[in-house]
Amino acid sequence: MIPFLDLQKINSVYRDELIDACRRVIDSGWYIHGNECACFESEFAQYCGVRHCIGVANGLDALTLILGAYKELGFMKDGDEVIVPANTYIATILAVSRNNLVPVPVEPDSESCLIDPRAIEEKITAETRAVMPVHLYGQTCEMDEISVIAKRYGLKVIEDSAQSHGAYFGGRRCGGLGDAGGFSFYPGKNLGCLGDGGAVTTDDDELSEAVRTLANYGSKEKYVNIYKGFNSRLDEIQAAMLRVKLRYLDEETEKRRRTAEYYLRNIKNEKIVLPYVRNPQDHVWHLFTVRTEERDRFQEYLKQNGIQTLIHYPIPPHRQMAYPEWNERSYPVSESIHAQVLSLPISSVQEESVTENIVRVVNEYE
Ligand SMILES: *Cc1c(COP(=O)(O)O)cnc(C)c1O
């Protein structure tokens, strides 16, 4: 079976360096909020082209803390609205709900599957405070148009960058394209640690300070609590793992791009719709997601031929039990995306012969 993602293989490339980094942390005697986290924060901030990075426990916390910090700073209050794409992973939406804010889903563009700037503008009300574009599958959203709309209505732009480490828009990297960015370092992400991890990026000094404080029990000074905070930390071991892997991220992205280009050039089957690419140099290919009418039949066919695939995602957020208030709503573009998408294997360690084999099997599908 060709696995969808082989994490053991991905990390084994850096095995010696990871073990050295781990040993360094063990021997340091300092396991939380130490040198590794501080160094990773400054290295990742530099990578994203922003002034601040705050390491946190996971991607959901990163997004939750950004919104929570805006509330503490008085920019948002309970019941305010945040615009989100209707076809995202549930974490984007949970981050809004968890802050007693109201997520307002909008339809994506049917071709790119990315949030549609025109649809954003239609949903803006007097209560709207922010928009959260998700750079889905590793491709950045239409950030110029989104920024113009945000400026016109005084909204914050919070990038969900959990799938797009290193992705570009207009020559700048995500995480620095809006007011703040939230990243996940879950093992399967393009930059993944060996456990859970996340980060917030921003150029805003005040927001950075508020996120850092909120993530540390609401405390800047030990035992003095100015907010009802969280405990959300990127631990030293994970930060040390990430410092090793960050050095190879661009190289890994190049390998993903080569695989994606091979798929794009060679998959020729009228039943299979290839993913939309705005600019090949901007995309980091977290997922290579094709679309087809009889998706489940196609997935079963690939499985029979030894190829593991995944669906991102099978159930749209508005059809989830967690959001019963939305279950009667209709988001036709989102629903058709959820019914048609299938992600083919792609990674930095996928061999050319494997990619060729997948293409052959896909092209023989009838
Ligand atoms: C993975 C992911 C998250 C959440 O990250 P975790 O680290 O798992 O909490 C948020 N948004 C999107 C789009 C994701 O893919």
Image: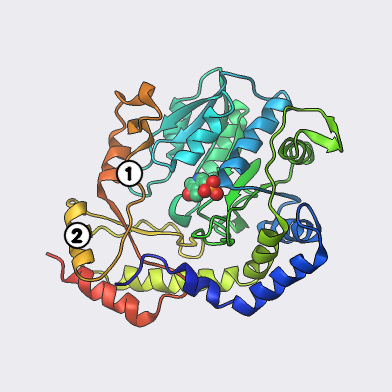
Amino acid tagged 2: Glu
In the rendered image, residue 129, in percent from the top left (x then y), is placed at: 59, 26
* Residue situated in front as seen by the camera: 237 or 74: 237
- Judging by the rendered image, the residue that carries numbered circle 2 is 300
Q: Residues within 10 Å of mark 1 (few under 14, many from 20)?
A: some
Nearer to us of marks 2 and 1 is 2
Q: Which residue corresponds to the image point at 64% horizontal and 47% vertical from the top-left?
A: 57
Q: Which residue corresponds to the image point at 41% horizontal and 66% vertical from the top-left?
A: 5
Queried on whether the Cβ of the residue with tag 2 lies below 8 angstroms from ligand 1, the answer reads no
Q: Quadrant of residue 206?
A: top right
- Judging by the rendered image, the residue that carries numbered circle 1 is 110
Residue 243 in view: yes
Queried on whether the Cβ of the residue with tag 1 lies below 8 angstroms from ligand 1, the answer reads no
- On screen, residue 58 versus residue 299, left or right, reads right
Label 1: state its secondary structure: loop
Residue closest to the far bottom: 353
